[in-house]
Image (spheres, rainbow, N blue to C red):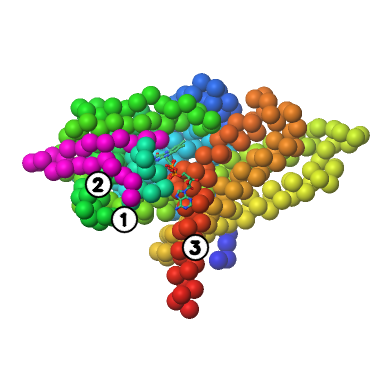
Amino acid sequence: MDFELSAEQQMYQRAVHDFCDGELRPYATQVDETGELRWDAIRRMPALGLTGLQVPEAYGGAELDSISAAIAIEELGWACGSTAISLAAHNGLCCVPITNWGTDAQKQRYLRTLTSGTVLGSLALTEPGAGSDLAGGVQTSAVRDGDSWVINGNKAWITNPKFAPVIVVLVRLDKEAGTRGFGMLLVEPGTPGLTIHPPEKKMGLKGSPTQMLTFEDVRVPADALLGEVGRGFHQTMQTLDGGRISIGALSIGLAQAAFEEAVKYAQQRRAFGKPISEHQAIQWMLADAAVEIEAARMLVYKAAWMKDAGKDFGKMAAMGKLKATEVAEKVCHNSIQIHGSYGYSREFPVERIYRDQRLMSIGEGTSEIQRLVIARHVLREMAAI
Ligand SMILES: Cc1cc2nc3c(=O)[nH]c(=O)nc-3n(C[C@H](O)[C@H](O)[C@H](O)COP(=O)(O)OP(=O)(O)OC[C@H]3O[C@@H](n4cnc5c(N)ncnc54)[C@H](O)[C@@H]3O)c2cc1C
């Protein structure tokens, strides 16, 4: 891939960067400490397309290409991990499936609200007993009763439900049909029988609510089905392939932020008569970080480019996510190391960024699952030679 961002992509990157620098980055510590997102900033996001990155313009979105969408999430991650994960889930996990598989009526009903900057959408796949193994583990079921679906079960670790006008819910429609027995249902909070539990107390990403949901005879109309009966698992896997580009981009943003903090600190802090940036051990950490961040960025952008080119991008998305999340872990670790004791203090942003990045190698498919996905592709490709 001969790679250069287009003039439009570069302009968009600058605009989003400036917005994030002014409206999110200065408040990231406050978001972490209060556990509240900065809605003043989110309400202004539609002007930059951030609340409808890949939603068609007809429904209030920005209809961006996938590299621009990745750049937007990267910049959000650079500024504030909590805001970035909530916006990544909103865009990639809620707006995308509704855009891809929604009927015109479903799109009319939800996408305009979702892109308005007043709400954030949600996707509920994970359950208390099912994360990596959704196919084998999902218990939440929906049965047809006249003109309704009746849902029972529990979902766990779901981002944004307290802000959502609609939650996309993965359910089992036919217990005997394996991966062909799933569906996605559009469930509105406030529907009788749906309980949205208080946010979990987490290590990081504290401004982004992660909640458990209980469904007790939750009745939704038949036309709340998103896509086709039996296609829910396939739709989930496709959604997660795109979501992995997003989590990869977010991880690069977090790594970039920690790296910039480390460079700044290393030039100010003196030890043994000179700035620590003049000690070779520190320079090596900075050099490795610069190389690794760029390598991860190229993988993630390549996956985004392949997606738009209509190529099979699943392997590249998994490679990008795996690399970017592991780079974020390493770069944030070393950025704290470069800060010494000050890195362990809440006074410096690297402490928060380190906690925020920890989720990235778990959510939307753990690193172990990414390796399984990559290995499956590699083995298939080699067998075909
Ligand atoms: C902050 C946060 C936000 C989240 N947001 C959402 C959301 O919006 N929507 C949603 O649906 N979910 C969400 N999740 C859930 C997240 O996607 C899952 O937690 C994740 O997929 C892992 O599932 P699990 O926790 O059940 O781990 P498990 O599947 O129980 O895995 C436990 C460990 O076993 C390993 N493992 C499992 N199977 C294998 C295997 N075959 N080979 C090797 N190792 C294996 C895993 O890699 C992991 O290390 C969120 C989680 C968090 C913490």
Q: Residue at x 20, y 33 (%)?
A: 218
Q: What are the residue bounds of the magenta stretch?
A: 136-158
Mark 3: few/some/many CA within 10 Å (<14, 14-19, 20+): few
Q: Which residue is mark 2?
A: 172
Q: Residue furthest top?
A: 34
In depth, the one of 260 and 124 nearer the eye is 124
Dot 1 falls on a residue whose secondary structure is helix
Cβ atoms under marks 3 and 1 closer than 8 Å? no
Q: Residues within 10 Å of mark 1 (few under 14, many from 20)?
A: some
Work out how far the residue at label 3 is from the one at label 1, CA to CA, in angstroms.
20 Å
The residue mark sitting in front, 2 or 1, is 2
Residue 187 relative to residue 85: left or right: left
Alpha carbons under labels 2 and 1: distance apart: 13 Å
Image location (x, y in percent) of residue 50: 44, 40
Badge 2 crowding class, 10 Å Cα cut-off, few under 14, some 14 to 19, many 20 or more, is many
Mark 1 = which residue? 234
Q: Is residue 236 left or right of residue 102?
A: right
Which numbered dot is residue 157?
A: none
Q: Is residue 328 above or below residue 154?
A: below
Tag 2: amino acid: Arg
Instruction: Find disc 3 in the rendering and name its residue.
Output: 375
Residue drawn at the location 42% of the way across and 65% of the way down: 311
